Image: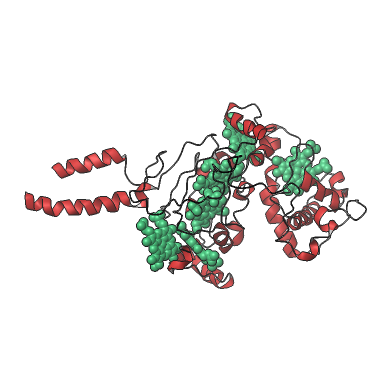
Amino acid sequence: MRFLLLVAALVGTLGCVRGCTSSRPPIHPIPNMDDQPRYEAQAASDFFSDGMTMRTPVAGTVARNPLPLATWTDSRFMTGRDAAGEPVLTIPVAVDDALVIRGQDRFNIYCLPCHDRRGTGRGIMFERGAIPTTSLHVQRIRDASAGELFDVISNGVGLMPSYKYPLSPSDRWAIIAYVRKLQAEHDE
Amino acid sequence: MGAIGGAVMPLLAVGGIWYFGSPEYTDVGYQPHQPIPYSHRLHAGELSMDCRYCHASVEVSAVANIPPTTVCMNCHTVILRDSDKLALLRESLRTGEPIHWLRVHKLPDYAYFNHGVHVRAGVGCASCHGRVDEMEVVRQVEPLSMSWCLDCHREPARHLRPLNQVTNMRWSPPPDQLEFASGAIGDRQLKPPTDCSGCHR
């Protein structure tokens, strides 16, 4: 009897059965070395004055390491502009199936929310906020050079945000290759 | 009476530790109150946004990454720009002070985990985080215990997907899953570690 009371008391104090939802942080009866004095990614820091463990790179830093060495100094590839600063007319990498498939994959992550799966512009911003979102099928965008589209993805335009950070230059070119495919397939 | 007590007491103690000491009890179900009532059910479910739109580094890095304020502001500069629920977000954008999201899933520091390796191997988010697209607030559904990791490392076949389905929350294994998986294990050269140094490095 006393033991049953003990169990009841235990369940009572510990709250609930396995797997029930609780907003109290997990308690580990034996803490082991679960929490070692080290910083975790994105954790708060009481050392740095801005309170963040992760440091901001120096202004103007360009992440280059995943890209082939030859592209580092290729301004057509990195910025979409030629030596004279004019937007390049065509995609400065070989367009093959692999590039277009990569582009489709990235488009469906980063562009689909607003521009819709087919690029019509009837996405979240338009449906939920009545924000005019440019269709990628209008003549102006069909006529735009690859370099101009690269500039839109890299720096944004109007209410369209910049996608420089999640998308490396090679992914941006892949998306443009896929946008060209969408434009050729759909006529609206 | 004393003899029965002597027999039952250790059993209860063992049973109690087994039941209450396991991460199944201590960790599963943790659902903290987040500073902003952000909903995965709305964003990842109803609006069908891909996980990687926000958790952008999950394919390439050990950590999945919680999105910075600017990612939310891609939309919320215009959508619901006056909502009270988003006041903290606007404040954060103005001051540069990050949102203090509370961590839900956390392994002990002596265990090594890497998202990129698992995502590139074709293990879906849902295998480890459950149906996040149906959660108003994220909640831990798997114990993240060593035996749980090993169960899959010994027999990953049920969890392997085509690489473009990793973030698809509605995916379920097709009838020929086992055939597909044995092919995938060969093609992708998967070797989930079961030796101690794989995860305790």
Give the percent coordinates (x, y) of residue B184: 56, 69
Residue placed furthest toward the bottom: B186
Q: As drawn, which residue projects farthest toward the right? A: A84
Q: Nearer the viewer, residue B149 or B108?
A: B108
Farthest-out residue, left: B1
Camera-side residue: B164 or A120?
A: B164
Query: Residue at 87% across / 48% down in the picture?
Result: A144
In this view of the protein, which residue sits in the foreground, A109 or B177? Answer: A109
Q: From the viewer's perspective, tell me whether residue A107 is left or right of residue B44.
A: right
The residue that appears at 33% across and 48% down in the rendered structure is: A29
Pinpoint residue A147: horizontal percent, then vertical percent.
85, 52
Left or right, residue A1 beside residue A14:
left
Q: Position of residue A170 (x, y in %)?
A: 75, 58
Q: Quadrant of the N terminus of chain A?
A: top left
* Residue A180 in sight from this viewpoint: yes
Which color scheme does this rendered protein use? Answer: secondary structure
| Front position in the image: A88 or A184 | A88
Depicted B187 relative to depicted B60: above or below:
below
The percent coordinates of residue B9 (x first, y second) are: 16, 51
Quadrant location of the C terminus of chain A in the rendered image: top right
Task: Give the total of numbered labels.
Answer: 0
Please report the residue visible at 46 percent of the width from the left and 44 percent of the height from the top. B139
Specify whether residue B148 is in view: no
Location of residue A162 (image quadrant): top right
The picture quadrant where one finds residue B43 is top right
